[in-house]
Each structure stands twice: as C-alpha cells, then as structure tokens.
Amino acid sequence: MTIDITQLAVGDTLPPLEFGPISRHTLALYCGGSGDLNPIHVDSDFAKASGYEDVFTHGMLSMATLGRLLTNWTEQDTIRSLSVRFTAITKIHATVTGSAIVRERTNKGGEDLLVLDLTTHTQDNQQTTKGTAIIAVPTV
C-alpha cells in the first residue's frame, strides 16, 4: 500500500507493521547486534531468578519496530524525532504490531510537519510501547 505523505491529515493511520513471533533466536541475535547483553533477555534461569516467568524482549527491539514502521513509508531523512516510552514487557514468542496515527499537522520554521502517535501491541492487545514521531513532509 502506497501512502502519499503530502496528503496525510489528522486522524489518518499508517499501515501497521507486524513483527514476530519473537523467538529466543531473535533475542540472541538482537543481543549481539545491539550490544545489549543483559542476561534477562536470553538466560531463562537468570530471568526466573529475577522474578520473571521467562526471558523477555528488549524494549529497544519494540522501538525498532516503530522505526521500521516509519521507514516503510517515508525516507529516514524526513524523521525529525522519535521518542518512545516502554509501557509493558514484551514476552518471548509475542507478535508485536506497530501502529501510527496522525495527531497533528503543523508548520514550524517553514517546514510542514506531521506529529504521529505511535504504539506497539502484542497479539493479546497488550500495549508495550507508546510514543511520538515528528515527520517532515517533503515539498513536491
């Protein structure tokens, strides 16, 4: 689905991005790629000794899903900001869906901007991240 960014208005949604299910292999690869080697994400015994049912996903992996959601329909250089707050743990084997809705269209410093509300949810509708992105609308 192609979206014309110049035509987006308040209330419009972007096509969602689904990622997962997140496997132990995915977590191990993310540990190596990100440098986040916290054993809570890959060592079941460590996670259980820390009071969790099992290992869980890195918060930044969920944030990366939102980054991919954005770059699926706009160029990376149009992204002015991306901020996220982690609202819940994403459990192992979860499938995460990232979504975005246009909250505001504004102009700042002569630049046409979209303010997007972002979220990720797991397949059981648990919100795991909440955030905001500001995207510059390219001039035609």
Image: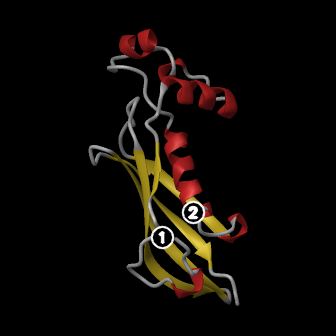
- In depth, the one of 92 and 135 nearer the eye is 92
Q: Residues within 10 Å of mark 1 (few under 14, many from 20)?
A: many
The image shows residue 16 at horizontal and vertical percentages of: 44, 60
Q: Is residue 122 above or below residue 69?
A: above
The image quadrant of residue 68 is bottom right
Q: Nearer the viewer, mark 1 or mark 2?
A: 2
Residue at image position (41%, 45%) is 96
The image shows residue 112 at horizontal and vertical percentages of: 61, 85
Q: Is residue 109 above or below residue 78?
A: below
The answer to whether marks 1 and 2 mark residues whose Cβ atoms lie closer than 8 Å is yes
Disc 1/disc 2 C-alpha distance (Å): 10 Å
Tag 1's secondary structure? strand
Residue at image position (43%, 22%) is 55
Which mark identifies residue 70? 2
Residue at image position (50%, 23%) is 24
- In depth, the one of 5 and 63 nearer the eye is 5
Indicate the quadrant containing the C terminus: top left, top right, bottom left or bottom right. Answer: bottom right
The image shows residue 5 at horizontal and vertical percentages of: 57, 80
Residue at image position (65%, 68%) is 80
Q: Is residue 31 above or below residue 112?
A: above
The image shows residue 50 at horizontal and vertical percentages of: 39, 16
Identify the residue under disc 1. 116
**Amino acid, disc 1:** Leu
